[in-house]
Amino acid sequence: MKRLCALLFTLTFLSTLPLSTRAAEGPGKFKVGEFEFTRPAKWEWVDVGNSPMRKAQLKVTSTDKQSANAEVVFYYFGEGGAGGTKANVDRWLGQFQEPREKLNSKIEDVTVGKHKMTLVQAEGTYMSGMPGAGHPAIPQANSMLLGAILESPQGNVFIKMTGPDKLVKASHETFKKMARSALE
Protein backbone atom coordinates (compact mmCIF):
# COMPACT_ATOMS: atom_id res chain seq x y z
CA MET A 1 0.00 0.00 0.00
CA LYS A 2 2.87 2.36 0.81
CA ARG A 3 4.40 1.71 -2.62
CA LEU A 4 1.10 2.40 -4.33
CA CYS A 5 0.69 5.66 -2.45
CA ALA A 6 4.25 6.67 -3.29
CA LEU A 7 3.69 5.85 -6.97
CA LEU A 8 0.43 7.83 -7.08
CA PHE A 9 2.11 10.77 -5.36
CA THR A 10 5.00 10.69 -7.86
CA LEU A 11 2.67 10.50 -10.87
CA THR A 12 0.53 13.34 -9.52
CA PHE A 13 3.64 15.43 -8.84
CA LEU A 14 5.07 14.82 -12.33
CA SER A 15 1.80 15.81 -13.98
CA THR A 16 1.99 19.21 -12.25
CA LEU A 17 5.46 20.02 -13.55
CA PRO A 18 5.71 22.59 -16.34
CA LEU A 19 6.12 21.09 -19.81
CA SER A 20 9.63 22.51 -20.10
CA THR A 21 10.67 20.49 -17.04
CA ARG A 22 9.07 17.28 -18.32
CA ALA A 23 10.58 17.75 -21.80
CA ALA A 24 14.04 17.48 -20.25
CA GLU A 25 13.31 13.82 -19.43
CA GLY A 26 13.99 12.79 -23.06
CA PRO A 27 17.48 12.60 -24.51
CA GLY A 28 19.17 15.87 -25.42
CA LYS A 29 20.92 14.17 -28.33
CA PHE A 30 19.73 11.20 -30.36
CA LYS A 31 20.88 9.34 -33.44
CA VAL A 32 18.85 8.46 -36.54
CA GLY A 33 20.77 6.65 -39.26
CA GLU A 34 24.26 8.11 -39.33
CA PHE A 35 23.12 11.54 -38.11
CA GLU A 36 23.10 12.85 -34.55
CA PHE A 37 20.46 15.43 -33.69
CA THR A 38 20.20 17.81 -30.77
CA ARG A 39 16.66 18.12 -29.45
CA PRO A 40 15.61 21.77 -29.12
CA ALA A 41 15.21 22.59 -25.43
CA LYS A 42 11.47 23.34 -25.48
CA TRP A 43 10.52 20.42 -27.73
CA GLU A 44 9.28 17.35 -25.89
CA TRP A 45 10.52 13.82 -26.46
CA VAL A 46 7.78 11.36 -27.49
CA ASP A 47 8.31 7.62 -27.09
CA VAL A 48 7.78 5.85 -30.45
CA GLY A 49 7.70 2.36 -28.94
CA ASN A 50 8.61 -0.36 -31.42
CA SER A 51 7.58 1.49 -34.55
CA PRO A 52 9.43 0.07 -37.55
CA MET A 53 9.20 3.42 -39.37
CA ARG A 54 9.41 6.12 -36.71
CA LYS A 55 12.87 6.27 -35.21
CA ALA A 56 12.28 9.37 -33.08
CA GLN A 57 9.48 11.85 -32.44
CA LEU A 58 9.24 15.26 -30.82
CA LYS A 59 6.27 17.41 -29.86
CA VAL A 60 6.18 21.18 -30.16
CA THR A 61 3.64 22.53 -27.71
CA SER A 62 1.44 25.47 -28.55
CA THR A 63 2.00 28.38 -26.20
CA ASP A 64 -1.68 29.36 -26.08
CA LYS A 65 -2.76 25.89 -24.88
CA GLN A 66 -5.91 26.29 -27.03
CA SER A 67 -4.33 25.27 -30.33
CA ALA A 68 -3.17 21.87 -31.43
CA ASN A 69 0.47 20.91 -31.04
CA ALA A 70 2.91 20.11 -33.84
CA GLU A 71 4.76 16.85 -34.23
CA VAL A 72 8.23 16.24 -35.62
CA VAL A 73 8.80 12.67 -36.79
CA PHE A 74 12.13 11.15 -37.85
CA TYR A 75 12.00 8.24 -40.30
CA TYR A 76 14.83 5.93 -41.33
CA PHE A 77 14.42 2.88 -43.56
CA GLY A 78 18.05 1.94 -44.24
CA GLU A 79 19.96 1.96 -47.50
CA GLY A 80 17.64 2.48 -50.47
CA GLY A 81 14.51 2.35 -48.29
CA ALA A 82 11.39 4.52 -48.81
CA GLY A 83 12.31 5.66 -52.32
CA GLY A 84 14.28 8.68 -53.38
CA THR A 85 14.05 12.32 -52.43
CA LYS A 86 11.66 13.36 -55.23
CA ALA A 87 9.26 10.48 -54.49
CA ASN A 88 9.08 11.50 -50.82
CA VAL A 89 8.65 15.21 -51.59
CA ASP A 90 5.78 14.29 -53.94
CA ARG A 91 4.26 12.01 -51.27
CA TRP A 92 4.42 14.75 -48.64
CA LEU A 93 2.85 17.35 -50.92
CA GLY A 94 0.20 14.81 -51.84
CA GLN A 95 -0.87 14.62 -48.18
CA PHE A 96 -2.68 17.93 -48.59
CA GLN A 97 -6.24 18.31 -49.76
CA GLU A 98 -5.40 21.16 -52.12
CA PRO A 99 -3.60 20.66 -55.43
CA ARG A 100 0.16 21.20 -55.32
CA GLU A 101 0.03 24.60 -57.06
CA LYS A 102 -2.14 26.00 -54.22
CA LEU A 103 0.08 24.89 -51.32
CA ASN A 104 2.50 27.82 -51.24
CA SER A 105 5.13 25.10 -51.39
CA LYS A 106 8.88 25.63 -51.45
CA ILE A 107 11.58 23.08 -52.13
CA GLU A 108 15.21 23.96 -51.51
CA ASP A 109 18.34 21.85 -51.91
CA VAL A 110 21.27 22.64 -49.62
CA THR A 111 24.68 21.00 -49.44
CA VAL A 112 26.39 20.91 -46.06
CA GLY A 113 29.79 19.23 -46.06
CA LYS A 114 29.43 15.97 -47.99
CA HIS A 115 25.66 15.70 -47.56
CA LYS A 116 22.71 17.05 -49.52
CA MET A 117 19.62 18.16 -47.63
CA THR A 118 16.29 18.91 -49.27
CA LEU A 119 13.99 21.25 -47.36
CA VAL A 120 10.26 21.15 -48.08
CA GLN A 121 7.55 23.55 -46.98
CA ALA A 122 3.80 23.52 -47.73
CA GLU A 123 0.63 25.10 -46.30
CA GLY A 124 -3.01 24.08 -46.60
CA THR A 125 -5.40 21.40 -45.38
CA TYR A 126 -3.21 18.54 -44.21
CA MET A 127 -4.76 15.09 -44.36
CA SER A 128 -3.41 13.39 -41.25
CA GLY A 129 -3.21 9.65 -40.87
CA MET A 130 -1.34 6.83 -42.52
CA PRO A 131 -1.87 6.96 -46.29
CA GLY A 132 -3.03 3.60 -47.61
CA ALA A 133 -3.21 2.03 -44.15
CA GLY A 134 -6.99 1.66 -44.15
CA HIS A 135 -7.49 4.55 -41.72
CA PRO A 136 -9.54 7.52 -42.86
CA ALA A 137 -7.49 10.68 -43.33
CA ILE A 138 -8.56 13.54 -41.09
CA PRO A 139 -8.48 16.99 -42.72
CA GLN A 140 -6.66 19.62 -40.66
CA ALA A 141 -7.22 23.10 -42.10
CA ASN A 142 -4.65 25.88 -41.70
CA SER A 143 -1.79 23.42 -41.37
CA MET A 144 1.82 23.48 -42.43
CA LEU A 145 4.43 20.87 -43.21
CA LEU A 146 8.16 21.40 -42.86
CA GLY A 147 10.28 18.56 -44.09
CA ALA A 148 13.96 17.77 -44.40
CA ILE A 149 15.51 14.86 -46.24
CA LEU A 150 19.12 14.23 -45.27
CA GLU A 151 20.78 12.10 -47.93
CA SER A 152 23.30 9.43 -47.04
CA PRO A 153 24.74 6.33 -48.73
CA GLN A 154 23.70 4.47 -45.56
CA GLY A 155 20.08 5.51 -46.10
CA ASN A 156 18.26 8.81 -46.10
CA VAL A 157 16.74 10.29 -42.96
CA PHE A 158 13.33 11.91 -43.39
CA ILE A 159 12.15 14.53 -40.89
CA LYS A 160 8.58 15.78 -41.12
CA MET A 161 7.02 18.46 -38.93
CA THR A 162 3.26 18.99 -39.21
CA GLY A 163 0.83 21.09 -37.23
CA PRO A 164 -1.02 24.41 -37.10
CA ASP A 165 0.51 26.86 -39.57
CA LYS A 166 1.20 29.57 -36.96
CA LEU A 167 3.04 27.18 -34.65
CA VAL A 168 5.04 25.55 -37.45
CA LYS A 169 5.98 28.97 -38.89
CA ALA A 170 7.15 30.08 -35.44
CA SER A 171 9.27 26.89 -35.21
CA HIS A 172 10.70 27.11 -38.75
CA GLU A 173 14.18 28.40 -37.89
CA THR A 174 14.57 25.99 -34.96
CA PHE A 175 13.61 23.09 -37.25
CA LYS A 176 16.12 24.11 -39.94
CA LYS A 177 18.88 24.65 -37.39
CA MET A 178 18.26 21.21 -35.84
CA ALA A 179 18.30 19.47 -39.23
CA ARG A 180 21.33 21.36 -40.52
CA SER A 181 23.41 20.85 -37.37
CA ALA A 182 23.22 17.06 -37.82
CA LEU A 183 25.17 17.52 -41.08
CA GLU A 184 27.94 19.67 -39.65
Image (cartoon, helix red, strand yellow):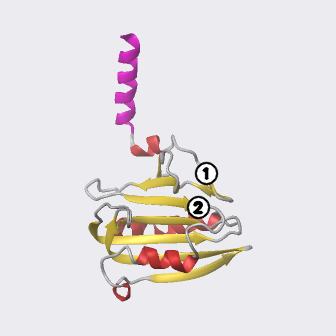
Q: Which residue is mark 2?
A: 77
Residue displayed at 27% across by 68% down: 139
46 vs 23, nearest the viewer:
46
Residue displayed at 57% across by 63% down: 178
160 vs 174, nearest the viewer:
160
- Quarter in which the C terminus is drawn: bottom right
Q: Secondary structure at mark 2?
A: loop
Q: Which residue is mark 1?
A: 30
Where 30 sits versus 9, above or below? below
Judged by its main secondary structure, the magenta piece is helix
Where 21 sits versus 57, above or below? above
108 vs 178, nearest the viewer:
108
Residue displayed at 33% across by 85% down: 99
Q: CA distance from mark 1 to mark 2?
A: 16 Å
Image: magenta residue range: 1-17
The mark tally for this picture is: 2
Q: Counting residues from the N terminus, which is met first, the one under dot 1 or under dot 2?
A: 1
Q: Badge 1, how many Cα within 10 Å: few under 14, some, many 20+?
A: few
Q: Secondary structure at mark 1?
A: strand
Q: Residue 169: x, y in percent? A: 41, 70
Is 156 left, or right, of 121 in this rendering?
right
- Where residue 39 sits, quadrant-wise, is bottom right
- Where residue 12 sits, quadrant-wise, is top left
Which amino acid is tagged 2?
Answer: Phe
Where 115 sits versus 50, above or below? below
Q: Does residue 93 show up magenta in the picture?
A: no
